[in-house]
Image (cartoon, rainbow, N blue to C red):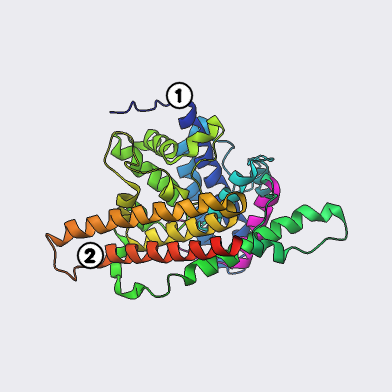
Amino acid sequence: MAKRKGPEDPEVVAGLAYGSALMLGSMFVGMRLMEEETDGVRRERMAAALKRQIEEYDALYQEEAIGPSPDLDGDGELTGDELLTSLGSGWDPEMAAKFVIDLLFTRPFSPSFLNFEVEDQDDALCEIAFQIGVPTFMSGVGAELLVAPEDDDDLDPLLADAFVGSLRLLEKSARKAHRKINWKTIGLWGGAGLAIGLVTAGMAAPFIAAAIGGAAGLAGAAALAHGLAVLGFGSLAAGGLGMAGGLWIVAGSGALVAGTTVSAGAFLAQMGSIQAREEIVKLQVATAAVTIPTSVREASTSVGVLAERRQEINQLIDDALTRNEDDAPEIEDLEAIVESLSSAMEWINEQVEDAS
C-alpha cells in the first residue's frame, strides 16, 4: 500500500493553497455579483450565503489560506479589491487558465442557489484573469474575439475579456455536444451519489477532494488536503500543472486514490450523471482552451483515456445489471454518463481536427 502524505508534505500544502485560492476566487465573484444586484431581498440572501462560505473557509484553511477571508460588514478587514490582490499575480499561464475555467463552472453562492447575471460573473472573472496573469496563448475562438487596442496599456484587459469570452463560447459548444441525452428522464438519481451531488456545478473540486481524503481514512481539513494533493493540485510544488479544470478525469489510469480501488470512472459514477456531465464539460473546455493550444498530441491522447473511463462505467453497468432491472434508475444514470463521455470524445476529436 502506498504511503499516505502527511499534513506537512509539500504537495498537501500546495493542495491547500489551490483550494484556498479557489474559494477566495469564488467569494470574490460572489461579492462582485452582490454589488451589482439591484433586488434587495436577493442581495441579502447573497450576503447570507457568502457569510456561510466565509465561515467554512476560515474553518477549512486557517493558517494554510493564501489570504484572509473577505469582510461583508465593512469593518475594514478586507475589501473586494484587496481580496482580488490576495490571489497574487504572475501565475503560470496554463495554471491561470485552468483556475479561471474552474471558477467559470463555479456557483459563487454554493451550496445555496441564487440567480445572477452571467455578464456580471464574466466581468468578475475578467478581473481575476487580469490579476493573476492573462494566458499568453489563445484558442482560435479567443483570437477571433481579440481586437487590437489603440494603446498597449489596454492590451491586458482586452486579453482578459477575450479569454473569458472564448471560454463562454467553448462552454456553449461543449454543452451542445450533450443535447442528445434526455436529462429529464434521469430524475433525482443523477444528482445523488456522493455529497458533492448536492453542490451546484463548479464547486466540485474541493468536495471531490474531501471525498477522496475520506476514502483514504482521513477527515475534515486533512481529508481535503490529501484529496487535493491526490487530484494533482499538490504537484504544483514540484513544478507540475496539477489537474485543475476537470483534467483529473484523464489523469493517469488505475486507482485514483493511492492504496484504494477508487478509479476516476468510479468517482464519475458516484457523483451522478448530472454532476459528472458538468465535470466532463469542464474537461472539454479545458482541453480546447489549454491542452490543444499547447499540445495537440496530448489532447488526442486524452480521448483514449476517456474511452478507458467509458469502459470503467460500462463495467459498473454490467455489475449493476446483476442486481437491477434493465431500466432501473441506477442503470439509466450510468448509461447517461457513458453517453456524456462518448459525446465529449467526439467533441474533442473535432477540436483536434480543427487545430491540426
**In terms of sequence position, does the residue under pointer 1 or pointer 2 come before the other?**
1
Q: In this view, does 60 lie to the left or right of 310?
A: right
Q: Position of residue 303 (x, y in %)?
A: 44, 56
Please tell me whether mark 1 or mark 2 is closer to you in this view.
Answer: 2
Vertical arrangement, residue 46 with respect to residue 184, above or below: above
Out of 348 and 332, give the one closest to the viewer: 348
SS at mark 1 in the image: loop
Q: Residue 28 carries which label?
A: none
Q: In this view, does 142 lie to the left or right of 268?
A: right
Q: Check the image and name the residue furthest to the left.
A: 323
Q: Where is residue 37 in the image (x, y as percent from the top left)?
A: 61, 65
Residue 65: image quadrant is top right
Residue named by callout 1: 8
Q: In this view, does 189 lie to the left or right of 100?
A: left
Judge whether residue 81 can be spotted in this image.
yes
Q: How crowded is mark 2: few (under 14 residues within 10 Å), some or many (20 or more)?
A: many
Judge whether residue 36 can be spotted in this image.
no
Look at label 2 and name its amino acid: Ile
Q: Residue 331 carries which label?
A: 2
Asked if the magenta segment contains residue 80, the reply would be: no
Q: Which residue is drawn at 28% across and 65% down?
A: 335
Vertical arrangement, residue 114 with respect to residue 111, above or below: below
Separation (CA) of disc 1 from disc 2: 42 Å
Numbered range of the magenta stretch: 110-131
SS at mark 2 in the image: helix
Q: Which residue is drawn at 63% across and 56% down?
A: 125
Can you say which quadrant of the picture contains the C terminus? bottom right
Q: Where is residue 180 in the image (x, y as percent from the top left)?
A: 39, 75
Q: How crowded is mark 1: few (under 14 residues within 10 Å), some or many (20 or more)?
A: few
